[in-house]
Structure formats: C-alpha cells, structure tokens
C-alpha cells in the first residue's frame, strides 16, 4: 500500500461525496446520513495525520517519490479502518464487487470516448470549427475517464487487498 492507493481512494470518496451533495440539492434522497459522513470525515483526518507523521519521519523518501513511498504500518492500519468504515457505511458504493463494477464501467467509458476521438480525428474534416471543438471536448472527456478509471482501479485493488488480509491480525494489507 502506498500514497497513490490512499489518494486514489480519497478522490473516489470525494467525487462520491460531491455527487451526494448534488443529489440532495436536487431533492433526491440521501444515501448516507450526516452522522455517517461525519464519522468518515473523522477517520479520513486520522489517515491524513498518520500520513503527515510518516512524511516527517521519512522526509528523504517522501520528497523524492511521494506517491510511491510505502506507508508505515500505522498509516496502513488507519487506511484499513477508514476503508472498513467506508464499506460498512456504503456497501453499495465501496464493496469490492461494486468497486470492480464501477472500475469496469469507467474503463468502458474511457474506451468509448477515446474511440470516438480517434474516429473523429481520422474521418471528420478538421477544417470545420465545430469538428475541432467536438474533438477537443471528446479528448477532455477521454482524459477525465482515464483518470477516473485509474482511481477506481486502484481503489478496487486496495479494498480487495484489505479484504484478503482482513482476518489476519499479524499481517498488514501490504504484506504478502
């Protein structure tokens, strides 16, 4: 487990929280209670403080390769507790099977948008301004879908790894 895994999970949760706010703003029923969100926020602050402590103790590593630096055992356990709370609070969003499905759907969206960019670039006349604009929009959408796909893939991988080693208290999720 490294900083990239932790950040990917954080971005997935952040996007979902923003979507939840928008759902509530437009009158939809909330999927999570404010108490659950507050508990998750507290767990996330614990993860962040543990990561900051790691960085201060291993400054030489975290400056050179901040995202690929392995997390300490304390930070790993903080991430595990956050993920456990996340899965318990919202199994329909963060369960291993659900994250796999979300990751595969995001991958399909990326492939579709990248394919449309390639088709538009190959077949449509670029001299027409609306075609150039459409190609640019599709390229931005493909880029966003790629980022989302990678984040969901890393989050799925993290949750799957936590689930595999959850019953073994002497091992951490990163140990094999």
Image (spheres, rainbow, N blue to C red):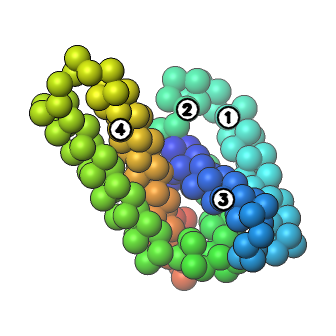
* Left or right position of 107 against 50: left
Tags 2 and 1 touching, CB below 8 Å: yes
Tags 4 and 1 touching, CB below 8 Å: no
Label 1 and label 3: CA atoms lie apart by 31 Å
- The label shown at residue 19 is 3
Q: Name which residue lies at 40% across and 69% down.
A: 100
Label 2 and label 4: CA atoms lie apart by 31 Å
* Residue under numbered circle 2: 66
Tell me which numbered mark, 4 or 3, is placed earlier along the sequence.
3
Label 3 and label 2: CA atoms lie apart by 29 Å
Mark 1 vs mark 3: in front: 3
Mark 2 vs mark 4: in front: 4
Tags 4 and 3 touching, CB below 8 Å: no
For label 2, count other residues whose C-alpha is less than 10 Å away and answer few (under 14), some (14-19) or many (20+).
some
* Residue under numbered circle 4: 138
Residue 130 to residue 4: above or below: above
Tags 2 and 4 touching, CB below 8 Å: no
For label 1, count other residues whose C-alpha is less than 10 Å away and answer few (under 14), some (14-19) or many (20+).
some
Of helix, strand and loop, which one carries label 2? Answer: loop
Q: Name which residue lies at 39% across and 58% down.
A: 106
Of helix, strand and loop, which one carries label 1? Answer: helix
């Amino acid at each position: 487990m490294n900083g990239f895994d932790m950040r990917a999970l954080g971005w997935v949760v952040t996007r979902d929280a923003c979507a939840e706010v928008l759902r509530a703003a437009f009158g939809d029923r909330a999927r999570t209670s404010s108490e659950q969100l507050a508990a998750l926020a507290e767990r996330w602050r614990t993860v962040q403080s543990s990561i900051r402590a790691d960085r201060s103790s291993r400054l030489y590593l975290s400056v050179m390769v901040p995202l690929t630096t392995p997390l300490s055992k304390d930070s790993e356990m903080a991430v595990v507790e956050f993920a456990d709370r996340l899965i318990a609070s919202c199994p329909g969003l963060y369960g291993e099977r659900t994250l796999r499905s979300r990751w595969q759907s995001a991958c399909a969206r990326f492939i579709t948008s990248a394919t449309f960019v390639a088709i538009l670039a190959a077949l449509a006349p670029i001299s027409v301004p609306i075609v150039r604009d459409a190609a640019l929009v599709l390229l931005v959408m493909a880029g966003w879908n790629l980022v989302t796909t990678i984040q969901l893939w890393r989050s799925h991988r993290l949750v799957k790894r936590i689930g595999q080693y959850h019953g073994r208290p002497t091992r951490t999720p990163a140990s094999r």
